[in-house]
Amino acid sequence: MRRSDGTAALAGLAAQGFTLASTLLPIAFGDADALVLVVTAGALATVVTPALTMAAQHRLPVLDSVARVRSSVRAVATLAPIGASGVLLATFLILQLSQTPNPLQLAALIAGIALTQSLFLYSLSLLTREDRPTILLAARLLYGVTLFLATLAVALAGGSGEAYCVATIAAYLVVLLCLGIWRVHSIASVLSAPVMTFIRDTRDELIDSRMLVVSTSLGTLGGQVGALVTPTLGQFATSWAVAIRLMSGFQTLGSQTVGPLVDVRVARSLRARDHSAFSRQVRTANFLGLVIGVGFVFACALALALTDALPRSGELVPFIAGAILFCGTGVALTPSARILGLAGKPSARLAWDSFRFAGGAAILLIPSATLQLWSLAALGLAIYVAYLSIVRRAIRALET
């Protein structure tokens, strides 16, 4: 491991510590019910992120053309605000029609998380492409510290779900502001292009990214079914919200702390056409994913036991099955989740994501909370096994 990678890993672990602590604060302060809104709003925002960034996390790291990168920056600068405005309008109309209280406020929170999260993840993808793991995970550390402080302030003030959402948006904004100040001259040079250049770049990037955008959007929606189903789980809702909130924290560890180091090395091996190194990095990512998944299971059991949020004894089995087989496997996939996109296998990624989406959509239609949990367990296991099989085939295809 290079010294910069070791420093990055330490920064990433510290970042995840703060992020995980932020996840636990609402639970520790007795605000577990507020997590239902936070989890649902975050899930809806995450679903639209691939479209707002044009699947940048799967495309940017392996681009070797500076001109293509500059075009991508201009395209995202154009599309992300427009897309977030569309999210605001669509969410407001849906909430208004469903007679949800404070529809404009909730729609603004969801759109705000979608925009800031998208720009944050896009910025990290740029740093991955530039092979800057130390700066990348320093940004993650800043996000974790800011989120922890903002969440603590909300919890001490007797926080609501809306206030915790605002804390998330504030943390993203602080990082974006700092990265913007650091890169102000390069950003200004890229964004000083004529309007027609922005239009052309946005059109071209939309065309080039369309398959990955569709696949990752479907996959994200399928992956978020655990969060989207939370309000319909009745007696399981609070316990499940705690599990999903912890799952989100451990997924962040996998995708934004371990994942960037994997992405940097995978992209490096692919650009060098070193297929043996690529295969080795895939195996390492899968192993690390299993370790993080086991860590999630233990942390979830401890948090639920300490906060007395476990379901009643007669309802434990379906809840445990869902938490381990859906949430646990979802966490285990995060370090390697971008490998198919980086390896240039959009068709395989689309097939897998379509399966995730179809399974998730079917579960949302199930009327029984217990049956939903059992179905989530089965879907999680099937998704995990299918992904490992598809990645194995991709490795064989590159080696032949």
Image: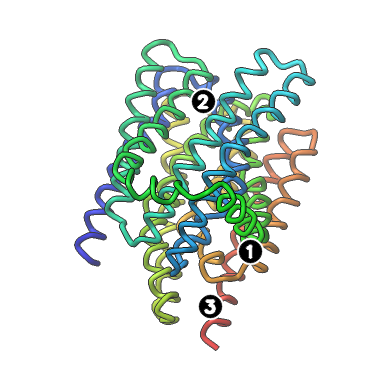
Q: Residue at x 58, y 82 (%)?
A: 397
Q: Nearer the viewer, mark 2 or mark 1?
A: 1
The quadrant of the image that shows the C terminus is bottom right
Pointer 2 or 1: first along the chain = 2
Q: CA distance from mark 1 to mark 3?
A: 14 Å
CA–CA distance in space, label 2 to label 1: 37 Å
Viewer-side residue, 53 vs 67: 67
- Secondary structure under tag 3 reads helix
Q: Is there any visible trace of residue 381 in the rendered image?
A: no
Look at 42% across and 43% down and name the residue there. 298
- Evaluate whether residue 194 shows in this view: yes
Quadrant (top left, top right, bottom left, bottom right) of the N terminus: bottom left
Q: Quadrant of residue 38?
A: top right
Disc 2: which residue: 309
Residue type at mark 3?
A: Ile
How many residues crowd around disc 3 within 10 Å: few (fewer than 14), some, or many (20 or more)?
Answer: some
Give the left or right position of residue 367, taking residue 315 as reference: right
Where is mark 1, residue-wise? 349
Mark nearest the camera among 2 and 3 is 3
The residue type indicated by label 2 comes to Ala
Where is residue 93? Give x, y as percent.
75, 24
Give the answer, above or below, for where 392 lies relative to 329. below
